[in-house]
């Protein structure tokens, strides 16, 4: 499989076969908004290396093994992460015709290592949603069952990896947007430590919560892509260098790792509850020690998360006014009307809801009650987790209370989807790294769990994930390209 | 949240809402705001607010001139341009 991916773009015949196979599959699944390997090949490694080396983007030097792993691999990028000359729609009518004038640091670092962007993936508008159903531009389906959603907001990236269209894809995670679709589609999904990967080139939604991460088909690849992307960046002043003593920390399995698990009624449906118990048993058989931990702030994560996310969204999305770029209405009497009409026509209902909510909680007189209180609760959540990580090395949790749900009215209401973010938003509020991992199939659908670690301790996530990968390899959906599983190049 | 409150908020957010949109959004916003009330149960006395999960101080950079080569690319994104000016409707 690896040798296939390494050579797929190099010869014209294999590139053409790859292109037509992905294009055909994409018509069924709707993973990509734009698929154009030729365009990606034109974003040259030299150009990206120059951008990385300009001094503006000095980062931690990735290990040679990580650079070698990503070299020559095709990859997909969520359509809210900038790639020079590609679309940057954010799944919105507002930016439907926008082309990015530059590449995100994370993308440039991968391209400098010799990886090639092949396309941009579908997503919930501006990252707001849990099913990729809030995209204004395309519908995305779960490759295990097309009548179900892919999860969101990085649904297109998850499907592109799960269906074997690319070995890895970039996504962004503000409240679970990488881990939840990864769990729904049976792939790995890493939300790194806040700030460890530069946000330069990530279209802003909720700046204090979000970050770029990776969805991939194996643990090795997830780790390598992360190692290549991470590093402090002068273009993002909230980015952070990994402490020197942790940069080269080994991700080889350790003995004696202590894993924390949540107890009590977690509000999981039967399949996920059974899967959580079974996963714990698998880990126990592998020799991991479990400790029951209490996370009393868990039930306040979602209100605190949505208060902060909506507040930041209302400020970040104020820039879309139809003047310098983005959708412009056909006619407006005056500049004020232009702005209102652009926003009326350009934004979908979920985006409007969050802008209104954010504007409301920031209104004079309400700030202490909502935004400030949410930020203080955020501190309480961080304190809870700091306490927990004094007695355990990792925390093992569900990703989402249900498996992939049906489209539209068959699924969860928008409000139910928000309530279900409680296990994922914890990592965003605290800034801690978390990895969603596939734990086999249940009723024919992927089941995902997540591991969370202290800040900059991603290597601990990979240690355990690697052991589990041998026991429970990622599930393969129907129509997974048979040729791509062997080492032959399709003709 | 009643419709008047919603329309005032919408005006602050520079959002124009149709009548049917207003009804649906008033309900959805109210549902979330009611849900936020749950935060009142938490004792936050003495807790400082978190603005950045891991960074504890502002990071500054030297105030130096740097060349940017993006201006022309960015102008290409403008919906309506005359020479190097972005065109908007008459202000007066």
Image: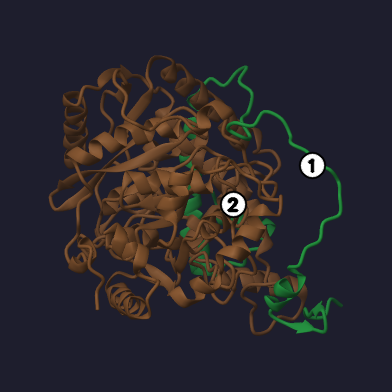
Labels 2, 1: one chain? no
Classify residue A302 by image quadrant.
top left
Chain hosting mark 2: A
Q: Colour of chain B?
A: green
User: In terms of depth relative to the viewer, which is nearer, A337 or A390?
Assistant: A390
Residue A174 visible somewhere in the drawing: no
What label sits on residue A313 in the rendered view?
2
Residue A188 visible, this angle:
yes
Q: Which chain is brown?
A: A
Dot 1: element: loop
Residue topped by disc 1 = B61
Q: Is residue A165 left or right of residue A93?
A: left
The image shows residue A111 at horizontal and vertical percentages of 52, 60
Residue A140 x/y as whole percent? 33, 66
The chain to which mark 1 is attached is B
Residue at left 14%, top 53%? A444
**Residue A90 percent location from the top left of the image:** 52, 64
From the top left corner, tell me how far across and down residue A103 is, in percent. Answer: 60, 62
User: Please, is residue A325 above or below residue A198 in the view?
Assistant: below
Which residue occupies 28% across, 76% down? Answer: A21
Picture quarter with the C terminus of chain A: bottom left
Q: CA distance from mark 2 to mark 1?
A: 26 Å
């Amino acid at each position: 499989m690896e040798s296939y991916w390494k050579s797929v773009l190099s010869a014209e015949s294999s590139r053409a076969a790859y292109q037509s196979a992905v294009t055909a599959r994409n018509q069924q699944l709707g993973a990509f908004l734009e698929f154009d390997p030729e365009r990606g090949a034109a974003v040259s490694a030299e150009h990206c290396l120059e951008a990385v080396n300009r001094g503006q983007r000095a980062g931690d030097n990735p290990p040679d093994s990580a650079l070698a792993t990503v070299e020559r691999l095709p990859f997909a990028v969520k359509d809210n992460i900038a790639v020079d000359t590609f679309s940057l729609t954010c799944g919105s009518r507002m930016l439907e015709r926008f082309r990015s004038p530059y590449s995100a640091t994370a993308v440039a670092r991968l391209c400098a290592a010799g990886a090639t962007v092949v396309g941009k993936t579908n997503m919930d508008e501006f990252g707001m949603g849990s099913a990729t159903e809030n995209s204004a531009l395309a519908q995305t389906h779960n490759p295990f069952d097309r009548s179900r959603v892919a999860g969101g907001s990085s649904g297109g990236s998850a499907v592109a990896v799960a269906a074997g269209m690319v070995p890895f894809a970039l996504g962004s995670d503000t409240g679970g947007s990488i881990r939840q679709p990864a769990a729904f589609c049976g792939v790995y999904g890493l939300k790194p430590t806040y700030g460890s990967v530069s946000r330069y080139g990530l279209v802003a939604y909720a700046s204090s919560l979000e970050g770029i991460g990776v969805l991939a088909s194996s643990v090795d690849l997830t780790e390598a892509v992360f190692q290549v992307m991470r590093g402090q960046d002068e273009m993002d002043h909230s980015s952070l260098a990994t402490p020197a003593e942790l940069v080269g920390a080994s991700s080889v399995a350790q003995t004696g790792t202590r894993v924390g698990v949540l107890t009590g009624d977690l509000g999981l449906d039967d399949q996920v509850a059974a899967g959580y118990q079974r996963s714990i048993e698998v880990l126990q058989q592998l020799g991991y020690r479990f400790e029951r931990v209490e996370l009393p702030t868990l039930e306040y994560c979602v209100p605190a998360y949505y208060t902060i996310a909506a507040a930041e969204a209302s400020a970040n999305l104020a820039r879309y006014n139809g003047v310098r770029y983005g959708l412009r209405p056909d006619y407006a009497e005056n500049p004020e009307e232009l702005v209102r009409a652009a926003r009326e026509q350009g934004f979908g209902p979920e985006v409007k809801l969050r802008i209104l909510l954010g504007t409301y909680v920031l209104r004079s007189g309400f700030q202490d009650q909502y935004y400030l209180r949410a930020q203080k609760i955020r501190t309480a959540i961080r304190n809870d987790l700091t306490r927990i990580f004094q007695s355990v090395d990792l925390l093992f949790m569900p990703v989402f209370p249900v498996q992939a749900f049906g489209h539209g009215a068959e699924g969860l209401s928008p409000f139910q989807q928000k309530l279900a973010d409680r296990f994922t938003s914890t990592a965003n509020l605290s800034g801690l790294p978390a990895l969603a991992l596939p734990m086999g199939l249940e009723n024919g659908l992927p089941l995902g769990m997540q591991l969370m670690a202290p800040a900059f301790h991603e290597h601990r996530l990979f240690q355990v994930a690697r052991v589990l990968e041998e026991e429970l390899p990622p599930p393969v959906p129907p129509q997974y390209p048979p040729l791509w599983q062997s080492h032959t190049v399709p003709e | 949240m009643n419709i008047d409150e919603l329309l005032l908020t919408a005006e602050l957010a520079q959002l124009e809402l149709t009548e049917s949109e207003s009804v649906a959004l008033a309900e959805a916003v109210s549902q979330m705001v009611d849900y936020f009330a749950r935060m009142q149960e938490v004792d936050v006395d003495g807790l400082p607010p978190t603005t950045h999960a891991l960074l504890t101080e502002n990071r500054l950079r030297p105030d130096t001139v740097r060349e940017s080569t993006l201006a022309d690319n960015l102008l290409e994104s403008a919906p309506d341009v005359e020479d190097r000016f972005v065109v908007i409707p008459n202000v007066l």
